[in-house]
Image: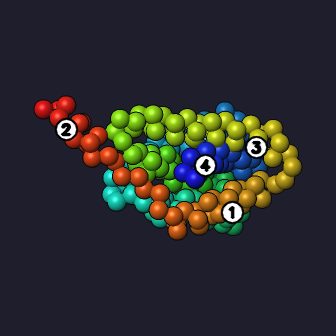
């Protein structure tokens, strides 16, 4: 279940970035400044999410808390059509320049969801690690799944989905998917305790 969650969240974050270019295009176009702003904001959000996810994972991690982490961007996605256009229009009217305007719009619209999605990988790693002897393999597998999901999300969105329906419908669909993932997680107990032998071995090596 956790591996599937990591894959889906990886797919959604890149799909959301591709769709973000369409969200900004009516007011700011699709110039290199728009793409540079989008990429920078998503990277900043993911970076912050990785850091926060690592910190949160050290404080009594549980699948219930993971479900709340996942449902937060899901709710934002479901509400996205209500606030995205007004915010984008307001920033456009302020006429802050071809560089600053798309950067601010990207930050306001996409930073917080990308932070939450970035939290998922390190948080799930803590839930999945059962032994220090295999912790590297577990972490590597989860990040590989997340990256593979991002590749699939990018290709499916740009090649197919974006031509089939509207941007807002796709983003709301992502919200529905995240909420659907979060609900069963809330009632599961997926935490794997690290083997004590692994901890003892690690401590003895540091003496």
Kindly identify which residue carries mark 2: 203
**Label 4: which secondary element:** helix
Which dot, 3 or 2, sits closer to the camera? 2
At 45% from the left and 38% from the top, the residue drawn is: 139
Mark sitting on residue 176: 1
> Is 122 or 164 nearer to us in this picture?
122
> Is 204 or 6 nearer to us in this picture?
204
Q: Quadrant of residue 148?
A: top right
Q: Is residue 158 left or right of 134 when viewed as pictured?
A: right
Q: CA distance from mark 1 to mark 2?
A: 44 Å
Q: CA distance from mark 3 to mark 2?
A: 47 Å
Q: Report x, y in % for residue 200.
A: 22, 41
> Is 33 or 129 nearer to us in this picture?
129
Kindly identify which residue carries mark 3: 157
- Point out the tag, 1 or 3, that comes first from the N-terminus: 3
Give yes or no for contact between labels 1 and 3 (Cβ–Cβ under 8 Å): no
**Label 1: which secondary element:** helix
Q: CA distance from mark 1 to mark 3?
A: 16 Å
**Label 3: which secondary element:** helix
- Point out the tag, 3 or 2, that comes first from the N-terminus: 3
- Point out the tag, 2 or 4, that comes first from the N-terminus: 4
At 36% from the left and 42% from the top, the residue drawn is: 131
Q: CA distance from mark 2 to mark 4?
A: 33 Å
Check the picture and name the quadrant holding the C terminus.
Answer: top left
Q: Quadrant of residue 80?
A: bottom right
**Residue 72 vertical position relative to residue 121 in the rendered view, above or below:** below
Give yes or no for contact between labels 2 and 4 (Cβ–Cβ under 8 Å): no
Q: Report x, y in % for residue 193.
A: 36, 52
- Point out the tag, 4 or 3, that comes first from the N-terminus: 4
Mark sitting on residue 4: 4
């Amino acid at each position: 279940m956790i591996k599937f969650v990591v894959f889906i969240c990886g797919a959604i974050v890149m799909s959301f970035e591709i769709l973000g270019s369409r969200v900004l295009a009516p007011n700011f176009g699709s110039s290199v400044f728009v793409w540079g702003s989008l990429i920078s904001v998503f990277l900043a959000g993911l970076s912050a999410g990785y850091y926060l996810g690592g910190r949160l994972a050290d404080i009594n991690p549980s699948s219930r808390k993971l479900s709340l982490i996942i449902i937060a961007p899901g709710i934002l996605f479901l509400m996205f059509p209500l606030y995205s256009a007004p915010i984008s229009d307001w920033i456009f009217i302020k006429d802050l320049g071809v560089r600053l305007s798309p950067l601010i719009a990207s930050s306001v619209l996409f930073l917080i969801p990308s932070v939450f999605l970035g939290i998922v990988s390190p948080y799930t790693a803590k839930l999945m690690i059962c032994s220090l002897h295999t912790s590297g393999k577990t972490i590597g597998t989860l990040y590989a799944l997340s990256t593979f999901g991002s590749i699939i999300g990018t290709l499916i969105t740009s090649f197919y989905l974006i031509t089939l329906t509207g941007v807002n419908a796709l983003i709301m669909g992502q919200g529905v998917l995240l909420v659907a993932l979060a609900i069963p997680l809330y009632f599961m107990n997926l935490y794997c305790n690290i083997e004590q032998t692994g901890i003892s071995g690690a401590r003895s090596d540091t003496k």
